Image (cartoon, rainbow, N blue to C red):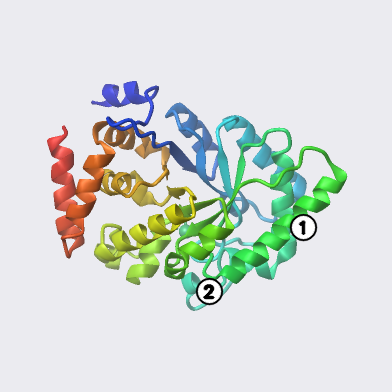
């Protein structure tokens, strides 16, 4: 079986009814890049820039960030690389930027820290735009958006950084911009957000955590955390419907995208791409090559008749078993 999966490496992620579903990988450390390349990743769907910040003891300078981002963009060129701006807070801490809060997941996190510290944000954006000069495979992604104001403010800063650089240097372009849909409010305003950006990226880790009120890292409540909860599935439907209305593609980049049972539903939902841990890529490619979109749609509509994640999972596992 391992050999079969290895042979899949060079085959396209395409359904039997001819739908291409690009499989990107999630990364944050340089080792993720080599794993991604070895598994035949079609690009980086989520680069967590906070990881390189976390393994240091002071903020990286603009030049240091430039070199890092350049390396990632070059390694995958011409394949797309989605660099997400800093998402610290929650469970991700920087020793040199301590944040002490009673409820970190509901606190100063992601875009909120960036908007309160425009110098940190602008430095990062400038480094990304410069790294993209002459390459053009950068896509920018903003984490933890919960209001349109956050997005609008971020866009003003990104445009400013871009125009300032364009005055000094050639080859600086405004890259496609996307938002993470990972806070329930963003699901309900997916239309307003989709109108403002080029793509949406669903983070099922935080979206599940916030929809179900379950800490994603707390073992004691792990059985309450399930991306197949009917509420999560309905949220995903709302997001894909909103994006389709505005002609914007949706990528799903949380851990759930690497779960074959969930991937079946995502196929049926008609998302444009998935971004997974490199280790999950071969299995998910097998799923995509084994199930038509039509079959995915049927499984999705069956899932909607169930009231519980456990019975939805059982139904999907049966479908996977039937396919071998
Ligand atoms: C998510 O929340 O699903 C996600 C992909 O981002 P992170 O895991 O970095 O919070
Ligand atoms: Mg997240």
Q: Which residue is drawn at 30% across and 45% down?
A: 263
User: Residue tagged by mark 2?
Assistant: 107
SS under mark 1: helix
Measuring from the top left, give residue 14's x and y in whole percent: 35, 31
Q: Mark 1 vs mark 2: which is more N-terminal? A: 2
Measuring from the top left, give residue 51's x and y in whole percent: 56, 50
Q: Is residue 250 above or below residue 108?
A: above
Q: Check contact, mark 1 vs mark 2: CB within 8 A.
A: no
Q: Is residue 18 above or below residue 321?
A: above
User: In the figure, residue 75 lies in which quadrant?
Assistant: top right
Q: Determine whether the beta carbon of the residue marked 2 sits less than 8 angstroms from the nearest atom of ligand 2.
A: no
Measuring from the top left, give residue 73's x and y in whole percent: 62, 36
Q: Is residue 177 visible?
A: yes
Which of the image's four quarters has the N terminus? top left
Q: Is residue 98 visible?
A: no
> Foreground: 266 or 1?
266
User: Residue tagged by mark 1?
Assistant: 160
> Foreground: 200 or 36?
200
Task: Classify residue 71 as left or right of residue 199.
Answer: right
Residue, far bottom: 102
């Amino acid at each position: 079986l391992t050999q079969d999966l290895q042979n899949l490496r060079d085959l396209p992620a395409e359904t039997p009814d001819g739908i291409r579903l690009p499989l990107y990988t999630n990364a944050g450390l340089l080792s993720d890049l080599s794993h991604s390349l070895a598994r035949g990743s079609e690009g980086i769907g989520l680069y967590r820039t906070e990881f390189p910040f976390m393994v240091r003891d002071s903020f990286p300078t603009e030049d240091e960030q430039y070199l890092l981002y350049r390396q990632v963009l070059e390694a995958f060129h011409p394949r797309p690389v989605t660099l997400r701006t800093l998402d610290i807070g929650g469970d991700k801490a920087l020793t040199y930027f301590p944040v002490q809060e009673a409820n970190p997941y509901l606190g100063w996190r992601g875009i909120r820290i960036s908007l309160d510290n425009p110098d940190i944000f602008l430095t990062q954006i400038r480094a990304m735009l410069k790294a993209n000069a002459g390459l053009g495979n950068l896509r920018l992604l903003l984490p933890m958006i919960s209001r349109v104001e956050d997005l609008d403010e971020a866009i003003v800063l990104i445009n400013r950084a871009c125009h300032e650089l364009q005055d000094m240097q050639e080859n600086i372009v405004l890259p496609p911009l996307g938002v993470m849909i990972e806070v329930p409010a963003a699901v309900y305003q997916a239309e307003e957000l989709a109108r403002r950006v080029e793509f949406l990226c669903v983070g099922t880790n935080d979206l599940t955590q916030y929809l179900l009120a379950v800490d994603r890292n707390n073992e004691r409540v792990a059985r309450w955390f399930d991306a197949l909860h009917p509420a999560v599935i309905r949220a995903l439907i709302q997001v894909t419907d909103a994006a389709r209305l505005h002609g914007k593609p949706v990528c799903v980049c949380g851990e759930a995208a690497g779960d074959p049972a969930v991937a079946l539903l995502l196929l049926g939902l008609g998302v444009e791409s998935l971004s997974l841990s490199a280790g999950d890529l071969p299995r998910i490619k097998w799923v995509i090559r084994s199930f038509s979109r039509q079959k995915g749609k049927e499984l999705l509509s069956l899932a909607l008749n169930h009231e519980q994640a456990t019975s939805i999972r059982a139904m999907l596992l049966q479908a996977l078993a039937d396919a071998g």
